[in-house]
Structure formats: structure tokens, C-alpha cells
Image (cartoon, rainbow, N blue to C red):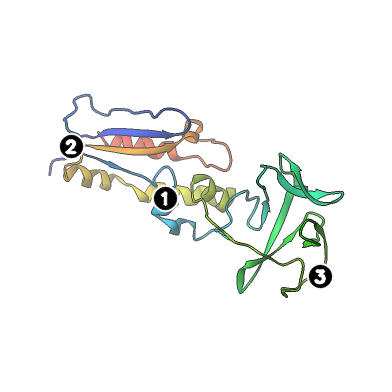
Amino acid sequence: MVYLPFLLIFNLISYFPSSSHAQNADLILPLKAVNLGNWLVTEGWMKPSRFDGIINKDLLLWRVSESCFNLRVFNKQFVGLGSQGVQAVSDTPTDTETFEIVRKDDDRNRVRFKASNGLFLQAQSETLVTADYAESSWDDSDPSVFIMTIVNTLQGEFQITNGYGPDKAPQVMQDHWNSYITEEDFNFMSANGLSAVRIPVGWWIAQDPTPPKPFVGGSSIALDNAFTWAE
């Protein structure tokens, strides 16, 4: 069986123009290419099961831990504790802008918000919310019970690494990089007449092996393997 060399193209996912690199200067046109999405940049719609191990996997935005979150409102400021109750005046979240979301076991959309003072938020009126409720119930009459509606979710690299956290994310991502695309896949593509592949990569790969949090290192090694397999 004859294997053909590949033209390897990688796209930098950032605010800058895409970059490309040719593995072989002697190109045979036209190129027949395939996109290797969801390998070095997470695209949750392609394999949503990768998120199944994350607790509260539907809450991945402004996530501090498995159950604690920052709440940002429409003016891009964060909800926090203030002298006159709960307010949204901070541009940068701190401990006072961090809330634990407690979900009802048999109805995950019924939630209570525990503030940094250990008390729950309660709706005093249509215009006033305070963090001073100590009781615990899920009754409809309980002013600390809210109905949470999730309109949409994000499932990208930031969300999956932040969701699993620094203890689990490195192994989860390494297992994915090692198994999602392999040398056998390159051999299969070549044997079936493909002569190029496009590999999306994230901007954080430029800082590998120590990218900024919550991203984890190791994706550049997988990209190096792709260059070797494409020869």
C-alpha cells in the first residue's frame, strides 16, 4: 500500500490571521483535504460526551469551582454583597462576588444562591435582593428559591479545562490528544487519496507547555506528532 505525503495546514484560533505550514514543497494539485476539528481545540458539539465527567457541566461560564460561580450581569459587572444588599458594581470578581449554587436534587433548575457571608440570597421585592436568609427549604413560598433557565451553553477548550479543574484536566486532555487522532488515521487518509489536513489550534499553544490557566500544556507535542505523521 502506498502512502502519500501530506500538506499540513494549521489554523491559529485567535484574533490574528491564520498561519499555515507546508510539509512538502512539491505539491500535487488539486489538494484533497479534511479538517481535524475537536482534536487540539475542543468543539463540544462534535463530541459532547467529553463533558460528561464535569459536575454541573451545564454551568461552565464564570465558574470558580464545581459549585461556586461569579454572576455577571448585562452591564458586564459582577453581582456581589454591598452595604445596601446585593448589588452589581464590581468590574472584577472577588470573594464577595462569588456564590455557591445549591441545586435541588430532583429538579436541577430550582436553585439557591449562598453568598460569601454563609447566608442565602432572597428576593425582598421586585427591585431588592438581599443575602440574609438562613432557613432551608424548597417550597414555592421560600423567597430564597429561584428558577434557573439555561438558554445556551458554551463547550470550548476554556470550558472543558476549567470544568475539570487543574487536578483532572491535564489527564483528560492528554488522553484525548493521544486517542482522538493517531498515526493510523493519517495512514488511512493517505491510503484513501487525501493529500492535506487542516488542524485548528488555539492561541494558547504558543505558550505551551505552560499556557495560561485554565488551559493545560501538551497540545504542541500532539501537533509535532502530526507533522511527523504527515511526512
Disc 2 target residue: 4
Whole-percent x and y of residue 185? 27, 47
From the viewer's perspective, tell me whether residue 76 is left or right of residue 33: right
Say which quadrant the N terminus sits in: top left
| Residue 57: quarter of image | bottom right
Whole-percent x and y of residue 204? 50, 35
Q: Earlier in the sequence, mark 1 or mark 2?
A: 2
Given residues 168 and 192, the one toward you in this image is: 192
- Rendered view: 66 above or below 166: below
> Could you tell me which secondary element the residue under label 1 belongs to?
helix
Residue type, mark 1 in image: His
- Disc 1/disc 2 C-alpha distance (Å): 26 Å
Q: Nearer the viewer, mark 1 or mark 3?
A: 3
Given residues 125 and 179, the one toward you in this image is: 125
| x 45%, y 56%: residue | 50
Residue type, mark 2 in image: Leu
- Rendered view: 145 above or below 7: below
Callout 1 crowding tier (Cα within 10 Å): few <14, some 14–19, many ≥20: some
